[in-house]
Image (cartoon, rainbow, N blue to C red):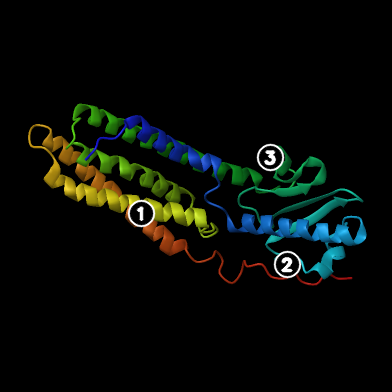
Amino acid sequence: MKSFHPIRVLCLILVLILAPGCVKIFENNHDLQAQKALKDLMAIQEQFYQKNQRYAKNLVEVEDYKLEYHSGIVYLEIESAGKNKYRAIALPAESTTARVFAYDTEQGGFYEMGEEEVASYVLGALNHIRNEQQQKRVVDIVSGLLMVILAAMGFKLHALYKGPKSAWAMVPYFLAIPPLIMSVAALNHMNRDIMMTPLLQTLIFGSIGLSVLAMVMNVMSFTKLPPGDNRPALIGVAMCTLMIAVFNIVVLANTYIKYSEPPGRGDTYFIPAPPRPR
């Protein structure tokens, strides 16, 4: 087996550790519904403008356009509107993430509000939500540091026991670490309100696939490892890899089975809002 470049592996691990901060992997179902409701309203406002040469001032004016959303789950409002501009906001009626979405023609269109602006819309539960989010961030940071330590240990062992046949123990070890990051993140973030998006499914199945590959290579390593003083240490690495891979597969398979059905089945789909009193 050809040797691998440790710097490339380290870069891959760091990217995977930092990725959750760049991409919203664990998307709350109610947040997705709020975004969809607002984007549907944006499309309807454009139709309304083409017909009336102005934007609708409230939701009553766009009733005939069949705007569909569950008003008990999503709070949607046109805050202001004029001939050439309007502002609308959407957020979960009972937010658990403190995310608020807005469309404002004067601020460049659709955007997600920052913390200062959010405080005006998410009131009583904001401190509780932020405390929960902070706890999850702490877990993510500690988990990330542990992954870096595991990677550093792997590089140290690779340097000590460098050799073509030693790679049969070290490569599976490094293959098992990225799925371990995903497994720990799933344990920290998954709940009944998280939507099983295509991105999340891809990461879960990709991580399971890497773990299975690590297990297969790990089993093969027991007959490939070189004899000598280094063999016991490399067998120890192989056993550690096996435990990590099994942990990954069990956690991620259970995560998919448990959360693959739509959140709040039958309760949170988009349905027409009830008629407004005239």
Q: Position of residue 11 (x, y in %)?
A: 41, 33
Q: Secondary structure at mark 3?
A: loop
Quarter the C terminus occupies: bottom right
The image quadrant of residue 277 is bottom right
Please tell me the numbered disc located at residue 114. Answer: 3
Q: Position of residue 191 (x, y in %)?
A: 50, 56
State how far apart marks 2 and 1 are (Cα): 37 Å
State how far apart marks 3 and 2 are (Cα): 27 Å
Q: Secondary structure at mark 1?
A: helix
Quarter the N terminus occupies: top left
Please tell me the numbered disc located at residue 208. Answer: 1
The image quadrant of residue 235 is top left
Residue closer to the observer: 176 or 190: 176
Residue pictured at 91% horizontal, 55% vertical: 54
Q: Are marks 2 and 1 in contact (CB under 8 Å)?
A: no
Residue 135 visible: no
Question: Tag count in the figure?
Answer: 3
Please tell me the numbered disc located at residue 68. Answer: 2
- Mark 2 residue type: Glu
Residue closer to the observer: 232 or 137: 232
Earlier sequence position, callout 1 versus callout 3:
3
- Mark 1 residue type: Ile
Is residue 216 left or right of 277 when viewed as pictured?
Answer: left
Please tell me the numbered disc located at residue 54. Answer: none
Up-down relation of residue 126 to residue 14 (above or below): below
Q: Which tag is nearer the camera, tag 3 or tag 2?
A: 2
Is residue 68 left or right of 27 when viewed as pictured?
Answer: right
| Residue farthest along the front direction in this orientation | 2
Residue closer to the observer: 216 or 25: 216
